[in-house]
Image (cartoon, rainbow, N blue to C red):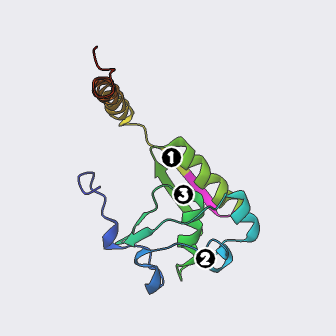
Amino acid sequence: MREAGLDFSANPPLTNPEFCGVHMPYLQDNTGASGLSGWESVNLQMHVPREVRYERGVFMVAGQSKGAMLLILLAHCPRYFPAVIFVDDNSANVEDVYAALNDRGIEITVFRYGEEDMAVEAFNEEQKEQAAQQLEELQSVIRSVFAAPSP
């Protein structure tokens, strides 16, 4: 982000002190304490929580509903935000955030960033080829280890 000239640490959304750093974003049996309604918990399919990290204006929530996590972040900010702009390279995340905040009545503008799509696709294809080669090598070793002995 620094290379792109983005520095959220200069004026990050302030949160309650306990929200900063690494922590569990909610209790599975009490998502209401994190700022979500019961309906939102069901609708956003809240599963077993994973650790999140909020630091210098950046909220890292890998593998969890981005919409739910953004609502939780906003619930821990003493300041009210009348509108939110969200940018992500994953269309599912963009849709998730839009639905969650729009359902809450928060003005939301979302953008799907696609500048790196070709690089990501090439990387993913390279990984697939590498994995296929490694699988073939593993199968060859397994065949040689478990081959029937010659009479």
- Along the viewing direction, whichever of 142 and 3 lies nearer the viewer: 142
User: Is there CB contact under 8 Å for labels 1 and 3?
Assistant: no
**Of the numbered discs in the image, which one, if any, rests on residue 111?**
1
Does the image show residue 138? yes
Q: Which residue is mark 3?
A: 66
Confirm whether the magenta stretch covers residue 42.
no
Give the image location of residue 93, x and y in percent: 54, 49
Disc 2 to disc 3, C-alpha distance: 14 Å
- Along the viewing direction, whichever of 73 and 135 lies nearer the viewer: 135
Disc 2 to disc 1, C-alpha distance: 26 Å
- Along the viewing direction, whichever of 147 and 139 lies nearer the viewer: 147
Look at the picture and state if 129 lies above or below 114: above
125 with respect to 104 (left or right): left
Q: Residue at x 57, y 53 (%)?
A: 109
**Quadrant that contains the N terminus:** bottom left
Q: How many marks?
A: 3
Q: Residue at x 57, y 73 (%)?
A: 26
Quick one: SS at disc 1?
strand
Look at the picture and state if 116 lies above or below 106: above
Residue type marked 1? Phe
The tag earlier along the polypeptide, 1 or 3, is 3
Q: Residue at x 44, y 42 (%)?
A: 113
Give the image location of residue 73, x and y in percent: 53, 71
Look at the picture and state if 16 lies above or below 58: below
Residue type marked 3? Lys
Q: Which residue is mark 2?
A: 34
| Quadrant position of residue 137 | top left
From which residue to which does the magenta span run? 104-109
Disc 1 to disc 3, C-alpha distance: 14 Å
Does the image show residue 81? no
Give the image location of residue 105, x and y in percent: 70, 63
